[in-house]
């Protein structure tokens, strides 16, 4: 579950920064929205960085616990960054979207 946190927060941040509000058909809001692709690329990049950190720890330690701890800490780190950005700009963006 910790691995999903960075991808979810990055996806929410992308949707907050680039809302797709001009659509006449509900399918257009989903199918013609590039935010989904951007979120997948960003999430994949973050997961790759987490993998690299875990691989480095695995190669340099003997036990499994340090690897699990590394995955948990890096997932939280990469999830808290977009969450903090989102928290800082959300109120202003919601006002801009409503106006």
Image: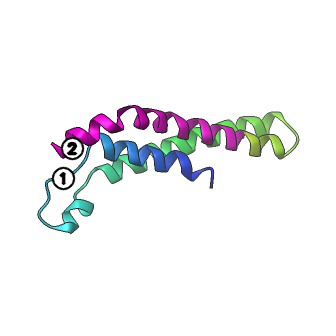
Q: Residues within 10 Å of mark 2 (few under 14, many from 20)?
A: few
Residue 20 percent across, percent down from the top left: 22, 51
Tell me: 66 left or right of 30. right
Say which of marks 2 and 1 sits in front: 2
Could you tell me which secondary element the residue under label 2 belongs to? helix
Task: Report the front residue among 42 and 20.
Answer: 20
Q: Residue at x 28, y 34 (%)?
A: 92
Instruction: Provide the residue span drawn in magenta.
Output: 70-99
Task: Report the front residue among 20 and 68.
Answer: 20
Residue 14's quadrant in the figure?
top left
Tell me: 80 left or right of 57. left
| Total numbered labels placed on residues in the image | 2
Query: Which dot marks residue 21?
Result: 1
Residue bearing mark 2: 97
Q: Residue at x 43, y 36 (%)?
A: 87
Magenta residue check for 96: yes
Magenta residue check for 83: yes
Q: Is residue 7 above or below residue 32?
A: above
Magenta stretch: dominant secondary structure: helix
Q: Residue at x 44, y 43 (%)?
A: 10
Residue 16 percent across, percent down from the top left: 32, 43
Contact between marks 2 and 1 (CB within 8 A): the answer is yes
Quadrant location, the C terminus: top left
């Amino acid at each position: 579950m910790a691995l999903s946190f960075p991808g979810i927060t990055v996806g929410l941040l992308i949707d907050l920064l680039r809302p797709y509000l001009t659509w006449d058909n509900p399918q257009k809001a989903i199918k013609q929205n590039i935010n989904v692709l951007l979120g997948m690329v960003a999430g994949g990049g973050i997961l790759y960085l987490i993998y690299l950190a875990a691989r480095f720890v695995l190669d340099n330690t003997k036990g499994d616990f340090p690897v699990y701890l590394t995955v948990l800490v890096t997932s939280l780190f990469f999830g808290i960054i977009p969450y903090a950005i989102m928290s800082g700009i959300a109120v202003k963006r919601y006002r801009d979207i409503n106006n």
